[in-house]
Amino acid sequence: MFVMDTTTVTHGIQLAVAPVFLLTAVAGMIGVIAGRLARIIDRARVVEEKGLATQDPAFLQRARTELAQLRLRGRLANAGIALLTLCAVLIGATIIALFVGETTEFESGKLAVAGFLCGVVSFLLALVCFLVETVIATRLLNFYLPDKS
């Protein structure tokens, strides 16, 4: 029979709690990117509706260009959310590995290190997706106003 003392369990909890702070950052980033994705979808719907209501070739060309950029931004946002979700799963697995390794005889050090590093890489890749999406969004701002004269 395996008996756990409170000191070992307490140390295991302390060790496993450290990666939880990364999970907090992941949750915040998912919220931010999900909000951006919702705005991308809303904007695409507006552009599509306006495009269906007009026959102006210049507007239709701008609308097609904007929709293509919105599609790319949506894909980047989806990739960012997928990477952040993967990060959360990997960090969760790291927490489990650290706790199990601390409270049992199971050697989980290499597993915990690999899970944590893969989680951090996933988080960094999600940040790159976020950066590229925001750069595309700001490039989309061409401040076009047609001459009325």
Image (cartoon, grey):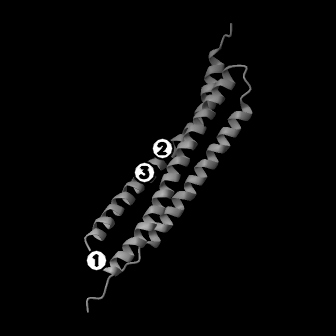
Horizontal side, residue 112 vs residue 142: left or right: right
**Which of these two is toward me, 46 or 108?**
46
**Which of these two is toward me, 85 or 113?**
85
Residues packed near mark 1 inside 10 Å, few (<14), some (14 to 19) or many (20 plus): few
Residue that mark 2 sits on: 27
Of circles 2 and 1, the one toward us is: 1
Pinpoint residue 1: horizontal percent, then vertical percent. Answer: 68, 6
| Disc 2, SS | helix
Pinpoint residue 22: horizontal percent, then vertical percent. Answer: 56, 42
- Total count of labels: 3
Residue that mark 3 sits on: 34
Q: What residue type is labelled 1?
A: Gln
Residue that mark 1 sits on: 55
Real-space CA distance between mark 2 and mark 3, rounded to the nearest whole angstrom: 10 Å
Where residue 11 sits, quadrant-wise, is top right
Vertical position of residue 120 compared to residue 67: above or below: above
